[in-house]
Image (cartoon, grey):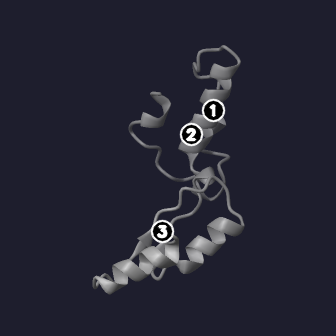
Amino acid sequence: PTVPEAVRALTDRGHRRIALASCFTAPGRFATQCAAAAPWIASEPLGTHPAMARLLLHRYDRALGRGGASNAGREARDGTTCGSAAGARPAATEPALAG
């Protein structure tokens, strides 16, 4: 369903505090439209999270045949240059890197 359809279905079931978890990797038209349809709160696009930078650099390293060892650099590992989520605490586990 679209975000408005899902919100409508949840509202019809009596839910009032509906949060939207964004799976967008960057801000833009679709992320903005979906967030605007959320009646309560919506998460930011994932692209600003330090874990996303680590994942992208890991996959880049693997594509170059480097095995994904930590070639990401200090900034990506500790989130010091990752936009608004720079102070966010990195996840304890990174299941997206496993596959």
> In the rendered image of this protein, does residue 61 appear above or below residue 23?
above
Reading the image, the residue beneath label 1 is 74
- What's under tag 2, amino acid-wise? Asp
- What's under tag 3, amino acid-wise? Pro
Label 3 or label 2, whichever lies nearer to me, is 3
- What's under tag 1, amino acid-wise? Arg
> In the rendered image of this protein, does residue 27 appear above or below residue 5?
above
* CB within 8 Å, label 3 to label 2: no
Within 10 Å of disc 2 (Cα), the crowding (few <14, some 14-19, many 20+) is some
Q: Is residue 72 visible?
A: no
> In the rendered image of this protein, does residue 34 appear above or below residue 94?
below
Choose the circle earlier in sequence order: 3 or 1: 3
> In the rendered image of this protein, does residue 42 appear above or below residue 12?
above
Residue 28 image position (x, y, % from top left): 71, 64
Within 10 Å of disc 3 (Cα), the crowding (few <14, some 14-19, many 20+) is few
* CB within 8 Å, label 2 to label 1: yes
Q: Is residue 20 visible?
A: yes
Reading the image, the residue beneath label 2 is 78
Q: Nearer the viewer, residue 24 or 47?
A: 24
Q: Residue at x 42, y 72 (%)?
A: 19
Residue 91 image position (x, y, % from top left): 43, 43
Residue 20 image position (x, y, % from top left): 46, 69
Q: Residue at x 39, y 39 (%)?
A: 92
Reading the image, the residue beneath label 3 is 1
Please tell me whether mark 2 sits on a helix, a strand or a loop: helix
The answer to which image quadrant residue 73 occupies is top right
Please tell me whether mark 3 sits on a helix, a strand or a loop: loop
